[in-house]
C-alpha cells in the first residue's frame, strides 16, 4: 500500500518523459540476445587471449612444471635476442620492398579494368584469381618451380638469358627473398586492385567531365582528380598491405622455413618457433605483446599520416 | 550510361593500350595457374627433369590416383578442410546475421560500445595472439579438434561479417518489419522470412569470405592440429612437401595444390559479384 502510494505521489521523480523508454518492437533485451553470441566470441577468443598474452609474458610459462613469475625479464631479454632483432629488420625490409610495387601494380590494374570495356569483367576476374587461390596454395606451387634445372622460374630466366638455369632459389637468402617478393606482389596486388577500383567507381563522372573540359590530359586527370579523391581508399589499401606484410608467415614457412639458417625468418615465424618448436611460451608471449603493440602503432600512425586535413 | 561515355571516349591509342595491357595481364596472371594444372598431370620424374619435348606432354592422372591412395592423407584432409570451411561459413553467417540485425535495428544503450568492441577486435592480428590462444583452446580441449578450428576461424571472420550484415540490414526499409510486428511475428521469424530475401546477398558475401578464408587458412591449422588424421589440406601439403612420407614427390605436391585451388576458383567465379561487393563494403565503410 505504502509503496503504491509513494510511487503515485512522486510522478516527476521517475521522469518518464525524459528517460528513454525501451522500444516495444525492438526491446533492449532482444538486442543484447542478438549480439551476445558475436560479442562472446570476440571476448573469449580475442580479448581474453590478448590479456592472457600479457600475463604469460611476465612468467616463464613452461609446458610442464610450475609457472614462475619473472617480471619484465622476458621483455628485458628482447633487445639482446639477436635472432629476433634480425627477424624484425628482415620483416621491415620485406615490407619496404613489396608495399610500393603492390600499390603501383594494383593501381595500374585498377586503371586497366575500371571502365566497362569489352572483356573488362573477365579481366577483373582473372587478375583477382591469385588472391582468391590464396598464399598457401600458390606457395606450394612455387616450390617445384623454384627448383634448379627443372623449375619454370629458371626456364623463364634462362630463355631471356639472365641465368644458366641452374639457380637454386630457395637455399640462398637474397634469392629466396627476391622470389618470395615477386610471388607476393603477383599474388596480392589483385586485392589492392579491387579496393582501388571500388573507390574509383565512387567518383562521379561529372568531375572527370569538367576536368576534361578544362583540357586536362589523362595523367593530369589521374593526378589531380583520381588520386586526391582516392586518398582514403589508397590509405586503406596501403594499411591492409603493410599489416599483411608485417605479419607474413605462410609463404616463408612453406618456401624457406625461415632459412637458410635464419636469413628469411619473419617476426611471426620466429615467434611461432619460440612458442611451438622451442616451447618457450613466456618469451613468445612477450614478443607477441610487442608485435600487437607495433602493429597497432603502425595502423594508428598510418591513419594519422593519411587523415583528412580539413 | 557510363558505359557509352567511356566507350566513345576511347581513342585508337587507348584501345590499343587496353588490348596490350589486358593481354599481358592475362598471360601474367593466368598462365602460372594453368601451368600448375599442367604440372599436376606430369609424373614426378618429368617435373624434376630438364624439360624434354619427348616426355613433357606424357600426361597422366598418376599423381591424383597416388595421393588418393595414401601419402599425406590428402583425401582425408580435403574432407577435414570441407568440414572446417563449411562449418565456419555457416557459424559465421549465423552469428553475423543475428548481431548485424541487433546493431542495425536496435537503438540500445550498449550498442555503440559493443559494436566498437567487435570492430576493434578486427585490428588485433591473430598471428600475434597465437600463443595464448593455443593455451586457451588447449585448456578448453579444443586443440586437435575440427570444432576448435571452426571456432577459431569463425572468430577471425566474424568482425568483417558483422560489419557486412549490419550494413545489409541498415539498407532495408523499416516499414517491412513494422508490418510484420503488427502481424505478431517474432524477431527470428522476421529475420528468417520477411527480411531473408533482402539480406541474402550480404549473407552470401559473408559465407563466401568465411569459406575461402578457412579453406586456405594455414597458421592456425598448423598450430592447433597435431594429429595427421585431422590435418586440413594446406597442412597435409606441408607434410607432403617436407617429405614426412619419404622423399619429396613434387607431382603429389602440385596435384594437392590443384585440388586446393579448384574449389576456390569455381566458387569465386560463380559468386564473384558478392565477393567484390563485400570488399567494397569493407573498404568504403572500414
Image (cartoon, helix red, strand yellow):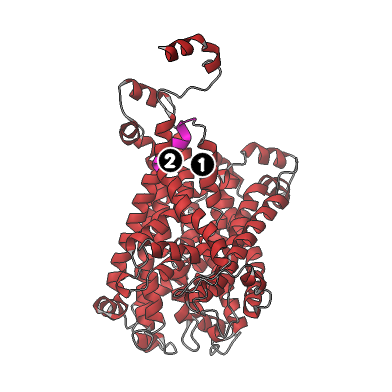
Camera-side residue of B102 and B59: B102
Q: Which mark is residue B204?
A: none
Q: Residue B104 magenta-drawn?
A: yes
Measured in 3D between alpha carbons, the distance from the residue under mark 2 to the one under mark 1, in whole angstroms, is 8 Å
Chain containing the residue with disc 2? A
Q: Secondary structure at mark 2?
A: helix
Which percent across, then down, holds residue A163?
A: 59, 87
Query: At x 53% / y 52%, what residue is drawn?
Result: B122
Q: Secondary structure at mark 1?
A: helix
Query: At x 51% / y 16%, what residue is drawn?
Result: A16
Q: Which mark is residue B114?
A: 1
Question: What range is drawn magenta here?
Answer: B96-107
Query: At x 58% / y 78%, what residue is drawn?
Result: A264
Query: At x 50% / y 88%, what residue is drawn?
Result: A148
Q: Which mark is residue A35?
A: 2
Q: Residue furthest front?
A: A2
Which percent across, then down, holds residue B95?
A: 39, 45
Amino acid at each position: 500500500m505504502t509503496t503504491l502510494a509513494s510511487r503515485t505521489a512522486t510522478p516527476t521523480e521517475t521522469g518518464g518523459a525524459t528517460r528513454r523508454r525501451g522500444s516495444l518492437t525492438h526491446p533492449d533485451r532482444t538486442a543484447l540476445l542478438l549480439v551476445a553470441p558475436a560479442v562472446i566470441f570476440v571476448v573469449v577468443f580475442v580479448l581474453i587471449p590478448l590479456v592472457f598474452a600479457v600475463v604469460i609474458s611476465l612468467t616463464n610459462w613452461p609446458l610442464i612444471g610450475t609457472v614462475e613469475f619473472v617480471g619484465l625479464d622476458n621483455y628485458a631479454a628482447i633487445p639482446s635476442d639477436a635472432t629476433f632483432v634480425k627477424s624484425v629488420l628482415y620483416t621491415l625490409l620485406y615490407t619496404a620492398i613489396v608495399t610500393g610495387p603492390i600499390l603501383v601494380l594494383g593501381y595500374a590494374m585498377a586503371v586497366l579494368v575500371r571502365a566497362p570495356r569489352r572483356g573488362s569483367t573477365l579481366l577483373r576476374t582473372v587478375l583477382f584469381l591469385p588472391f582468391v587461390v590464396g598464399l598457401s596454395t600458390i606457395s606450394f606451387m612455387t616450390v617445384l618451380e623454384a627448383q634448379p634445372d627443372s623449375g619454370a622460374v629458371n626456364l623463364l630466366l634462362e630463355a631471356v638469358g639472365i641465368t644458366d638455369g641452374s639457380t637454386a632459389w630457395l637455399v640462398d637468402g637474397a634469392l629466396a627473398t627476391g622470389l618470395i617478393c615477386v610471388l607476393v606482389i603477383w599474388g596480392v596486388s589483385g586485392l589492392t586492385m579491387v579496393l582501388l577500383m571500388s573507390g574509383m567507381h565512387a567518383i562521379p563522372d561529372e568531375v572527370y567531365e569538367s576536368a576534361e573540359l578544362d583540357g586536362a590530359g589523362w595523367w593530369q586527370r589521374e593526378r589531380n582528380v583520381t588520386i586526391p579523391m582516392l586518398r582514403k581508399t589508397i590509405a586503406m589499401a596501403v594499411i591492409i598491405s603493410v599489416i599483411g606484410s608485417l605479419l607474413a608467415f605462410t609463404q616463408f614457412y612453406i618456401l624457406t622455413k625461415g632459412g637458410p639458417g635464419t636469413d628469411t625468418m619473419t617476426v611471426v615465424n620466429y615467434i611461432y618457433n619460440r612458442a611451438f618448436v622451442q616451447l618457450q611460451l613466456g618469451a613468445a608471449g612477450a614478443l607477441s605483446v610487442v608485435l600487437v603493440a607495433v602493429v597497432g602503432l603502425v595502423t594508428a600512425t598510418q591513419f594519422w599520416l593519411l587523415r583528412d586535413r580539413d | 550510361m557510363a558505359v557509352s561515355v567511356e566507350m566513345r571516349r576511347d581513342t585508337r591509342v587507348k584501345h590499343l593500350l587496353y588490348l596490350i595491357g589486358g593481354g599481358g595481364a592475362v598471360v601474367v596472371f593466368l598462365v602460372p595457374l594453368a601451368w600448375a594444372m599442367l604440372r599436376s598431370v606430369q609424373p614426378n620424374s618429368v617435373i624434376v627433369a630438364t624439360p624434354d619435348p619427348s616426355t613433357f606432354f606424357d600426361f597422366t592422372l598418376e599423381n591424383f590416383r597416388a595421393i588418393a591412395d595414401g601419402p599425406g592423407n590428402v583425401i582425408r584432409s580435403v574432407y577435414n578442410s570441407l568440414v572446417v570451411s563449411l562449418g565456419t561459413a555457416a557459424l559465421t553467417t549465423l552469428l553475423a546475421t543475428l548481431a548485424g540485425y541487433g546493431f542495425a535495428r536496435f537503438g540500445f544503450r550498449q550498442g555503440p560500445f559493443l559494436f566498437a568492441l567487435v570492430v576493434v577486435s578486427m585490428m588485433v592480428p591473430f598471428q600475434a595472439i597465437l600463443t595464448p590462444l593455443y593455451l586457451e583452446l588447449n585448456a578448453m580441449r579444443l586443440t586437435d579438434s575440427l570444432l576448435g578450428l571452426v571456432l577459431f576461424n569463425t572468430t577471425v571472420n566474424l568482425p568483417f561479417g558483422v560489419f557486412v550484415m549490419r550494413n545489409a540490414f541498415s539498407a532495408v526499409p523499416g516499414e517491412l518489419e513494422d508490418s510484420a510486428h503488427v502481424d505478431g511475428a517474432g524477431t527470428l521469424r522476421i529475420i528468417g522470412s520477411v527480411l531473408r530475401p533482402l539480406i541474402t546477398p550480404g549473407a552470401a558475401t559473408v559465407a563466401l569470405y568465411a569459406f575461402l578464408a578457412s579453406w586456405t587458412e594455414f597458421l592456425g591449422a598448423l598450430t592447433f592440429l597435431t594429429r595427421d588424421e585431422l590435418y586440413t589440406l594446406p597442412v597435409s601439403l606441408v607434410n607432403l612437401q617436407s617429405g614426412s612420407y619419404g622423399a619429396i614427390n613434387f607431382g603429389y605436391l602440385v596435384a594437392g595444390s590443384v585440388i586446393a585451388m579448384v574449389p576456390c576458383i569455381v566458387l569465386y567465379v560463380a559468386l564473384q559479384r558478392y565477393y567484390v561487393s563485400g570488399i567494397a563494403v569493407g573498404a568504403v565503410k572500414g
